[in-house]
Amino acid sequence: MTTPIWLDPSPPARPALAGDQRCDVLVIGAGLCGSSAALSLAGQGLDVILVEADRVSGQASGRNAGFILQGTAERYDRAVGLLGAERARRIHAFSLDNHDKIAAFVEREGLDCAYRRGGSLQLAGSPREEEELVTSAELLRAHGFQAELCQGEALPAVYRDAGFRVGVILPRDGEVHPARLVQGIADAAVARGARLYEGTPITHLDASVPGDVRAATPGGTIQAGLALVCVNARAGQLLPFFADKVDPVRGQMLATAPAPRIFDRPVYADHGYDYWRQDHLGRVVLGGWRNLDPGAEVGLDDVLHDGIQDRMTHFLHRFAALRDVPVTHRWSGTMGFSRDGLPLVGAAPGTPGALAAVGFTGHGFGFAFLAGQALAQVATEGSHPLATELSPRRLA
């Protein structure tokens, strides 16, 4: 498996499950969503088991660029066109609430995860996209959100020199060391009483009977009152409902050695297909270009696509300050894309003993912390506004 820069080096492994166990709630998947759910439930005094087939943050939550962005996978103007103004505004607001909750957790725990809220920059790669960015910024402001249009001299020279002409700054976005954030959330869940097992895949899940969920692992069985399935792209392997509703889509990533600082915030370009930033150490982290070969970038396998990786390296050289900076890491990661581009959060049809939060469509850090809390609230109180808005039943 390729190693992302965020997991080099990795912390010591935690033990796998050994022997049969019982708990109130079984949380499957120790990424951002599952760890958040476990933290919330354990904080309420429930007996929680959190299992991870790989390592905490070892999959999509630790194999991304570390952006915390607002909104869905669609730019806001298109989201309004697809969802209607009011629904688009509500879902957009959820993503900002998600970010606020992440920021509050980081501050409360004093977590060292290189978190910074300095905004993001969307860049237009074509004249048509320039028009779309302007419209999107106007709609965001009209709906009460912050957006700053940058054209001409207002756009930093580093982007103008690379051929870009129009950008939009979203001041409330941010960035983070993604693996440290997720590991910190999982650690906080354990500190509140959750039992965490790494290297523990669920080989069979029976959630057909509410209150009597049975899960099999290589090391033993788990009996629980409820299961929360937070495995994103792999949801269909455990809950058949999601097999044709969440598709595994691979993303390519690379990172450089520390470089002269030329980027001051996360950047999205070409409708989000290209994205990059410099982390707290000055390393450029770059991903995207899936649109060059979308048919090949499907599946659960961790595979480097040489053609896309070459294109990404070539893109770095558009910036003069990066032409001699070596690439130190190349990796890929699998995301779960839902059929309508929105996360699926709440009761899993056909499996009354399970809830799920999956299908984040490349924007997991924009929704998954709140989604984990939403699952916890549905488990204990029966409902949460996010689960009402993004219920999986809409695709039934």
Image: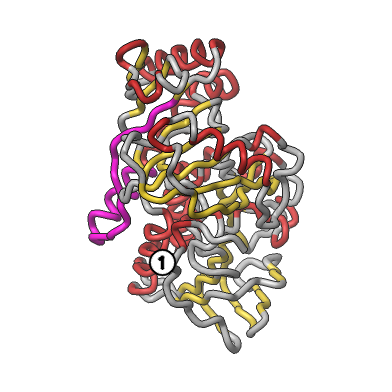
- The amino acid at mark 1 is Ala
Which residue is outermost to the front?
324
> Is residue 173 rendered to the left or right of residue 57?
left
**Is 286 in front, or is 73?**
286
Is residue 378 at least partly visible in the picture? no
Location of residue 167 by image quarter:
top left
Instruction: Look at the image and say whether residue 374 sits in the magenta stretch.
Output: no
Q: Residue at x 38, y 62 (%)?
A: 185
Q: Residue at x 31, y 39 (%)?
A: 261
Number of marks in the image?
1
Instruction: Look at the image and say whether residue 117 sits in the magenta stretch.
Output: yes
Location of residue 199 by image quarter:
bottom right
> Is residue 368 rendered to the left or right of residue 143?
right
Which residue is outermost to the bottom?
19
**Is 366 in front, or is 212?**
366
Query: Where is the C terminus found, in terms of image quarters?
Result: top right
